[in-house]
Image (spheres, grey):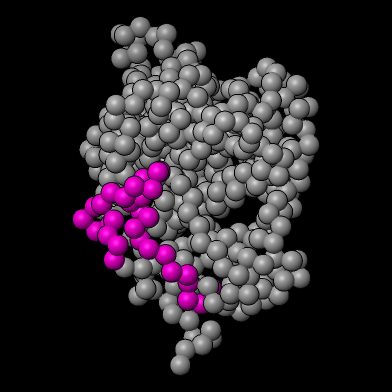
C-alpha cells in the first residue's frame, strides 16, 4: 500500500508536507480549487484543476495529463511527430508550490505552474518549463545568471460585441488620459489583484492600438518570469470579465495597425555583476554582454519560429511599427529588433539590459526565453561582435547601407521562419529533438490551417485564442 509519505519520483523533497500545510492555509482563505497550468507548443495555456484538499496528493503523485497537447494547434487540431501526437501514454503534472498564488480576481481559486513528469518519474522531454530550467542551470555552471521580464500587451474589448468581433472598450488617443479614466475602475482592480498575488508591477498604462493597454513587472529569474507572464494574463482576463470586458493577447487583434507584443527584457550577470553595465564596450557593455547580444541578433530569423509563432504574428511584424522586423540593434532604438537599454544614470549597474522586440504573446514564454538565452550563450562562446549600430528606422536604409550593417528583413512568413529554424543547429540542439520537432510540426500545422485565408480572416481566427 502506498501513502502520501511515499510519493513516486517527480515531486520536490518536502512538497507533500508543504502542500498539506498550504491546504490548511488555502481553506482558511476560502480557496476551494487549484489551477494547474502549463503552456503548450502553440502558445496556449492548458490547465487541469484539483480541489484544494487534493493539493497534497498532487504534490505527491502529480495529476494525469495526456502528452498529446504538445502537438495541439491553437484551435485544438492535432499534428504528430515521430514520438508525439499519439493518444497513447500519460504524464503527471507536478505543481511548483513556490509559485502558488491565490487568485484575487477568481475567488475560491489558487494557481500554480507545473512541471510535466513521465510516469517513471523522469522529466518529460517536451516540457518547456523543464527546458528553460535546464538552460538556466547549465549557464549557472558557467557562473552566469539572468534577469528577465516580459512586457504584456492586450486589447480590451466589449463582452457585448457580436460573436467573434472586436469592439474596443475605450476611446481616446494612444497613451491618452481618456483611456485611463474610462477604465480606471477596471485597471485599479487589476493593480490590486496583482499586488495581492505578489506581482511587482512596474507600469500599467494605455498603449498605442485601439483598446490597448500594457503592464510590465519587475525582473526575475527566467523561469519565474515565464511563470509570471502566465499568471498575469490569467489575472487580466479574470479582472476584465468581472467588468463586462474581454481581452485579446493575440499578436494581431485586427488585420491592420499595431498589434500586441510581448517584448522580452534580458540581462546576463556574473558573480552578482550586471554584464551590461560598467564594461569597456559600446554603451558600457562588457565583451560578454556584447557577444550575448550579437548571438541573439544573428539567430533572430530562426528565433522567430519560437518568439513570433502564430500566423497572426506576421500581421504584427510590419516595418515602421516598432515591432523590430530587421536584424538591427541600437541604443534606445525602438525600431531595432535588439534595443540596448542603458537605464538612467545612477542605477545603470542594476537597470541595464537588452530588449528583444520581435516577440509576442502567442509565444510559449518558456520556449522563447530558453531559445533567446541559448542564442546569446552561443554568441558568447564564439566571442561574437555586434555590427555597426543602426539609428532611426531601418526600413529607410538604402540597400547597400543595409547590407554593410548586416541589416536584413526578418522572415515575412511563418514558413520562412520554420525553414530558418530547421537549419539552426544551435536552437534545435538546445531544445532537443522532441521539442524541436514539436515546434516544427505545430508551426507547419498552423500554416496549413490558414492556407487561403486573407489577413482579415487570419486575424479573426486567432483573435480570442491567446
In the picture, measured across the screen, residue 343 lies left or right of residue 281, that is: right
In the picture, measured across the screen, residue 323 lies left or right of residue 56, that is: left
Up-down relation of residue 73 to residue 117 (above or below): above
In this figure, what is the number of numbered marks? 0
143 drawn magenta = no
- The image shows residue 148 at horizontal and vertical percentages of 54, 44
Q: Nearer the viewer, residue 427 or 309?
A: 309
Q: Main secondary structure of the magenta part?
A: loop
Q: Nearer the viewer, residue 166 or 6?
A: 166
Q: At x 64% / y 34%, what residue is drawn?
A: 160
- The image shows residue 452 at horizontal and vertical percentages of 29, 26
Q: At x 57% / y 60%, what residue is drawn?
A: 35
- The image shows residue 131 at horizontal and vertical percentages of 40, 55
Rendered image quadrant of residue 315:
top left
Q: Which residues are magenta?
A: 59-88
Task: Farthest residue to the front: give it.
Answer: 162
Residue 63 in view in this figure: yes
Q: At x 60% / y 70%, what residue is drawn?
A: 51
Task: Farthest residue to the bottom: give it.
Answer: 1
Residue 290 in view in this figure: no
Q: Nearer the viewer, residue 441 or 409?
A: 441
- The image shows residue 286 at horizontal and vertical percentages of 48, 35
Up-down relation of residue 330 to residue 305 (above or below): above
78 drawn magenta = yes
Up-down relation of residue 70 to residue 464 (above or below): below
In the picture, measured across the screen, residue 457 lies left or right of residue 354, that is: left
In the picture, measured across the screen, residue 175 lies left or right of residue 435, that is: right
Q: At x 44% / y 28%, what residue is drawn?
A: 459
Amino acid at each position: 500500500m502506498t501513502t502520501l509519505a511515499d510519493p513516486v519520483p517527480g515531486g520536490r523533497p518536502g512538497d507533500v508536507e508543504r502542500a498539506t500545510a498550504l491546504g490548511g492555509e488555502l481553506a482558511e482563505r476560502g480557496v476551494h480549487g487549484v489551477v494547474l497550468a502549463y503552456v503548450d507548443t502553440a502558445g496556449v495555456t492548458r490547465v487541469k484543476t484539483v480541489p484544494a484538499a487534493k493539493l497534497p496528493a498532487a504534490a505527491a503523485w502529480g495529476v494525469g495529463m495526456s502528452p498529446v497537447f504538445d502537438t495541439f494547434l491553437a484551435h485544438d487540431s492535432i499534428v504528430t511527430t515521430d514520438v508525439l501526437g499519439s493518444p497513447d501514454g500519460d504524464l503527471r503534472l507536478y505543481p511548483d508550490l513556490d509559485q502558488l498564488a491565490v487568485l484575487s480576481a477568481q475567488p475560491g481559486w489558487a494557481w500554480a505552474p507545473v512541471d510535466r513528469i513521465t510516469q517513471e518519474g523522469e522529466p518529460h522531454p517536451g516540457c518547456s518549463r523543464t527546458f528553460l530550467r535546464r538552460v538556466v542551470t547549465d549557464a549557472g555552471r558557467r557562473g552566469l545568471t539572468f534577469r528577465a521580464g516580459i512586457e504584456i500587451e492586450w486589447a480590451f474589448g466589449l463582452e457585448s460585441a457580436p460573436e467573434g468581433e472586436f469592439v474596443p472598450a475605450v476611446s481616446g488617443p494612444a497613451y491618452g488620459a481618456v483611456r485611463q479614466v474610462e477604465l480606471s475602475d477596471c485597471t485599479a482592480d487589476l493593480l490590486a489583484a496583482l499586488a495581492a498575488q505578489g506581482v511587482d508591477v512596474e507600469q500599467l498604462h494605455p498603449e498605442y492600438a485601439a483598446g490597448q493597454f500594457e503592464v510590465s513587472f519587475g525582473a526575475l529569474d527566467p523561469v519565474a518570469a515565464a511563470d509570471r507572464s502566465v499568471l498575469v494574463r490569467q489575472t487580466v482576463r479574470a479582472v476584465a470579465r468581472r467588468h463586462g470586458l474581454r481581452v485579446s493577447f493575440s499578436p494581431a487583434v485586427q488585420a491592420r495597425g499595431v498589434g500586441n507584443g510581448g517584448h522580452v527584457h534580458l540581462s546576463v550577470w556574473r558573480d552578482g555583476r550586471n554584464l551590461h553595465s560598467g564594461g569597456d564596450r559600446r554603451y558600457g557593455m562588457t565583451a560578454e554582454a556584447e557577444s550575448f547580444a550579437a548571438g541573439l541578433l544573428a539567430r533572430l530569423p530562426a528565433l522567430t519560429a519560437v518568439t513570433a509563432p502564430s500566423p497572426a504574428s506576421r500581421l504584427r511584424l510590419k516595418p515602421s511599427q516598432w515591432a523590430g522586423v530587421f536584424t538591427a540593434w541600437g541604443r534606445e532604438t525602438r525600431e531595432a529588433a535588439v534595443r540596448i537599454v542603458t537605464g538612467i544614470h545612477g542605477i545603470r549597474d542594476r537597470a541595464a539590459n537588452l530588449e528583444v522586440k520581435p516577440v509576442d504573446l502567442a509565444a510559449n514564454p518558456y520556449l522563447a526565453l530558453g531559445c533567446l538565452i541559448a542564442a546569446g550563450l552561443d554568441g558568447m562562446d564564439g566571442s561574437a561582435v555586434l555590427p555597426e549600430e543602426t539609428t532611426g528606422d531601418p526600413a529607410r536604409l538604402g540597400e547597400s547601407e543595409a547590407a554593410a550593417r548586416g541589416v536584413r528583413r526578418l522572415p515575412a512568413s511563418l514558413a520562412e521562419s520554420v525553414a530558418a529554424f530547421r537549419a539552426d543547429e544551435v536552437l534545435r540542439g538546445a531544445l532537443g529533438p522532441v521539442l524541436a520537432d514539436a515546434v516544427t510540426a505545430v508551426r507547419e500545422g498552423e500554416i496549413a490551417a490558414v492556407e487561403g485565408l486573407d489577413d482579415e480572416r487570419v486575424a479573426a481566427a486567432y483573435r480570442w485564442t491567446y
